[in-house]
């Protein structure tokens, strides 16, 4: 994959009503590790199984290196989510699997710390990333997948205007188990408003 012109090193922060999104930077490693560690039990049911060194400094360096490589190749952009009112790191969101040509699509994935849940921060973050994907990257379709039991994530996607399109059987290995996922998507010319189920 070749680097595309809109993947600049000086990508500005993206601002929503409640959040500011910034590309990852190295000097928040301790805050990131502390935030993830404090909310581990909340996150583990919805994520790939954590490695024993998940929050170690070396794992952090590898993560940042992967973020930068994906960004340089134009295949993904990771953002940290900061709550605007407090300036605190609340979570992360990634626009990944970016494809051009006839596809013009990407996939959004996210996490949020337990104490920041229920405030509308993630819905705002998904809307901001979706707007960036359509307006700046000129993508046509954004997809997201979530486990059917994850009612919070379903609400986030539907409030952000995503529509449920179907069920992906045994789609991702989450917390050590292959799990079904609902597929959600939003198209660039979808009217604004609340997403609906089929």
Image (spheres, rainbow, N blue to C red):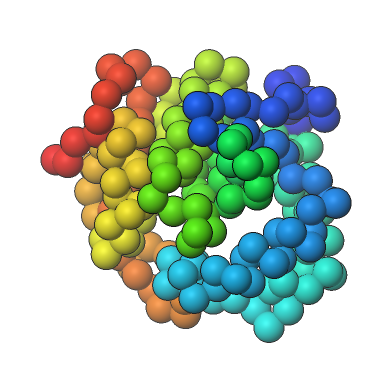
Q: Can residue 76 be seen in this view?
A: no
Q: Position of residue 101 (x, y in %)?
A: 54, 25
Quadrant hosting residue 38: bottom right
Quadrant hosting residue 8: top right
Q: Position of residue 162 (x, y in %)?
A: 31, 35
Q: Closer to the camera, 55 or 104?
A: 55
Q: Closer to the camera, 89 or 50?
A: 89
Q: Position of residue 144 (x, y in %)?
A: 40, 45
Q: How many labels does the image show?
A: 0
- Residue plotted at (36% across, 25% down): 187
In this picture, is 185 found above or below 137? Answer: below
Quadrant hosting residue 62: bottom right
- Residue plotted at (69% across, 67% down): 34
User: In the rendered view of the protein, which quadrant contains the C terminus?
Assistant: top left
Whether residue 27 sits left or right of residue 153 in the image: it is: right
- Residue plotted at (35% across, 44% down): 156
The residue sitting at the bottom extreme is 52
User: In the rendered view of the protein, which quadrant contains the N terminus?
Assistant: top right
- Residue plotted at (33% across, 54% down): 152
Whether residue 6 sits left or right of residue 45 in the image: it is: right
Q: Can residue 190 be seen in this view?
A: yes
The residue sitting at the front extreme is 86
């Amino acid at each position: 994959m070749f680097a595309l012109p809109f993947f600049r090193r000086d990508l500005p922060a993206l601002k929503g009503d409640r959040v500011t999104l910034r590309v990852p930077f190295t000097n928040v490693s301790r805050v990131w590790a502390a935030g993830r560690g404090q909310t581990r039990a909340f996150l583990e049911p919805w994520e790939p199984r954590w490695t024993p060194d998940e929050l170690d400094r070396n794992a952090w360096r590898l993560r940042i290196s992967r973020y930068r490589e994906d960004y340089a190749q134009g295949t993904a952009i990771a953002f940290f989510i900061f709550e605007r009112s407090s300036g605190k790191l609340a979570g992360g969101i990634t626009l990944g699997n970016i494809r051009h040509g006839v596809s013009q699509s990407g996939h959004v994935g996210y996490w949020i710390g337990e104490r920041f849940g229920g405030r509308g921060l993630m819905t705002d973050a998904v809307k901001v990333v979706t707007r960036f994907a359509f307006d700046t990257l000129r993508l046509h379709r954004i997809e997201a997948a979530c486990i059917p039991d994850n009612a919070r994530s379903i609400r986030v996607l539907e409030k952000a205007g995503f529509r449920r399109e179907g069920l992906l059987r045994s789609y991702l290995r989450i917390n050590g188990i292959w799990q079904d996922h609902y597929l959600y998507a939003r198209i660039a010319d979808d009217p604004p408003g609340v997403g609906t189920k089929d």
